[in-house]
Amino acid sequence: MCSCNSALCCCSEKTYVQDKVCTDWLILPTVATTVYTDNMATLISGTGYVKNDTGTAAITVAFLRSAAPVITAISVPPGGSSSFTVGRFDTITITSIAAATGEFCITVRYSM
């Protein structure tokens, strides 16, 4: 809620929360594996990284909104890693044409 006069508006402060989630993952060929789901029913932003440790093919990390079309996606080659900063998503999945394992880590931010 904001109160304004002719020259200035003052709004109540929002409380921002930051959480860090890290996990090891294993995927099977052509099966999308969900590595993160937002349970707050709010659009969030996040910064993190993903590693493709044992895959023989690239992995695709997809950032989705309500399981709808992909907002953005990144590709990580075998033995590689990639960092990301993405906003307005609620689900993250990993897929590949080959089995793979790796690590996923994200720090998410949202207002309460």
Image: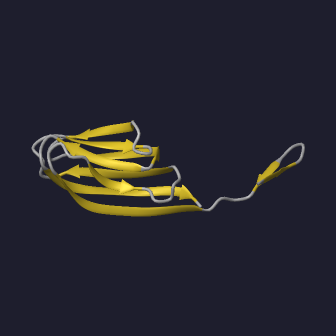
Question: Residue, x 19% and y 46% (percent of image)?
Answer: 80
Q: How many marks?
A: 0
**As drawn, is 12 to the left or to the right of 3?**
left
Give the vertical position of 24 relative to 65 (above or below).
below
Residue 46 screen position, x and y as percent: 44, 51
Q: Position of residue 69 (x, y in %)?
A: 39, 36
Q: Quadrant of residue 103?
A: bottom left
The single residue placed furthest to the left in the displayed view is 56
Please name the colour scheme applied to the rendered image. secondary structure
**Quarter of the image that includes the C terminus:** bottom right
Q: Quadrant of residue 36?
A: bottom left
Residue for point 49% across, 62% down? 18
Q: Relative to the observer, which residue lies in front, 8 or 98?
A: 98
Question: Residue pushed farthest right?
Answer: 6
Q: Residue at x 89, y 47 (%)?
A: 5
- x and y percent of residue 108 in the render? 45, 56
- x, y percent for residue 12: 74, 58
